[in-house]
Image (cartoon, rainbow, N blue to C red):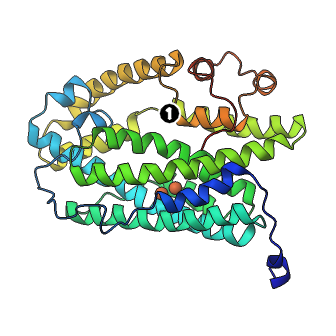
């Protein structure tokens, strides 16, 4: 890019996207002063309700001794926070790249503000991980591959669809779940502050895609919706299964449960029942996942697209369309 390219930056004039930049300042928070880091993290504190973690709501897990449950839950929280802290750094890289790639003044401004938010989130998670004071489990290969593929992208549409639209909508449900179930006040506080920022980031992804979709011919919209609806439904249908169970069993063994493997079939069966009930709840429209809310707002659930993709009768999509009729692309 040359000075001439920056001399008269075009602003798209999109009121929603322009207001995101102002909000990034008015809703600002300070990672040192807005969180009371003096509250200690005790070694026997599970940090969240046991039910938060995968398999944590199964009767078999619930019946384990308190110390065993605490170890397993703390390990699960540590693993998640480690994924989140590196996810924040990935998001910061994506935003820095977007600042350099985008030519629209308001889009660039949002990306610059978001990069700063992500830096702050990274620091907050890392500081809390430090306070827990134990080695965290490594991130899994699937997550690492997904982040690597995102880091290798160079097309603004791909970057924004993957980071702000897909990943941040996906992560929003994780943040909300963690915030709801967090029992440690510092963890709850940082999640409350971070979730506020993340809803702006997700909003940018939705508004950007809605604008892009509006300008595309029907065949491109169908192709785009096919790719992303596949990914969205795949991740919503992906519930705790054997991979997650292997981690739980390992944690139980670490803390001295000798017959941990023997519990596996029961845990799997009980978790399967919970998974089925949760999917039924999502299909009822009582609680629409953020991914489907974002898809609807970006225009991916428009009737002609769903028909072309044969998704009009997919239970989760029907639930999302039933669950409150929010209009397209007005998310702030
Ligand atoms: Fe973030
Ligand atoms: Fe974010």
Q: Could you tell me which residue is drawn at 37 percent across and 38 percent down?
A: 177
Q: Which secondary structure lies at badge 1? A: loop
Nearer the observer, 6 or 129: 6
Q: Could you tell me which residue is drawn at 78 percent across and 62 percent down?
A: 11
Q: Position of residue 180 (x, y in %)?
A: 32, 38
Nearer the observer, 82 or 206: 206
Q: Quadrant of the C terminus?
A: top right
Q: Quadrant of the N terminus?
A: bottom right
Nearer the observer, 315 or 169: 169
Instruction: Write down the quadrant of residue 108 in the picture.
Output: bottom right
Left or right: where 259 falls relative to 320: left
Q: Position of residue 310 (x, y in %)?
A: 75, 21
Q: Could you tell me which residue is drawn at 72 percent across and 39 percent down?
A: 227
Provide the residue designation for mark 1.
238
- Count of marks overlaid on the render: 1
Left or right: where 69 falls relative to 250: left
Q: Is residue 188 above or below residue 305?
A: below
Q: Position of residue 252 (x, y in %)?
A: 19, 43
Q: Position of residue 215 (x, y in %)?
A: 86, 44
């Amino acid at each position: 890019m040359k000075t001439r390219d920056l001399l008269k930056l075009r602003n798209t004039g999109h009121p929603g996207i322009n207001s995101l930049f102002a909000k990034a300042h008015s809703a600002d928070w300070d990672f040192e002063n807005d969180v009371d880091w003096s509250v200690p993290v005790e070694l026997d504190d599970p940090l969240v309700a046991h039910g938060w973690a995968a398999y944590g709501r199964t009767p078999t897990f619930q019946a384990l001794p308190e110390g065993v449950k605490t170890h397993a839950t703390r390990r699960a929280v540590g693993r998640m926070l480690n994924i989140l802290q590196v996810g924040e750094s990935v998001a910061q890289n994506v935003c820095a790249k977007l600042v350099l790639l985008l030519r629209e003044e308001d889009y660039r401004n949002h990306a610059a503000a978001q990069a700063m938010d992500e830096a702050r989130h990274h620091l907050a998670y890392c500081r809390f991980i430090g306070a827990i004071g134990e080695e965290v489990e490594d991130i899994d290969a699937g997550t690492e591959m997904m982040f690597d593929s995102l880091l290798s992208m160079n097309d603004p549409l791909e970057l924004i669809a993957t980071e702000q639209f897909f990943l941040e909508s996906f992560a929003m449900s994780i943040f909300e779940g963690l915030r709801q179930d967090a029992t440690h006040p510092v963890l709850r506080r940082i999640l409350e502050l971070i979730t506020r920022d993340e809803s702006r980031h997700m909003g940018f992804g939705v508004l950007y895609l809605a604008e892009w979709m509006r300008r595309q011919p029907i065949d491109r919209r169908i192709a785009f919706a096919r790719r992303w609806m596949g990914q969205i439904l795949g991740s919503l249908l992906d519930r705790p299964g054997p991979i997650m169970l292997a981690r739980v069993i390992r944690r139980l063994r670490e803390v001295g449960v000798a017959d941990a493997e023997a519990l596996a079939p029961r845990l799997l069966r009980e978790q399967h029942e919970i998974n089925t009930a949760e999917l039924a709840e999502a299909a009822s429209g009582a609680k629409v996942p953020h991914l489907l809310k974002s898809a609807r707002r970006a225009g991916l659930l428009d009737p002609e697209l769903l028909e072309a993709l044969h998704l009009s009768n997919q239970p989760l999509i029907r639930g999302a369309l039933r669950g409150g009729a929010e209009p397209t692309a007005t998310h702030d």
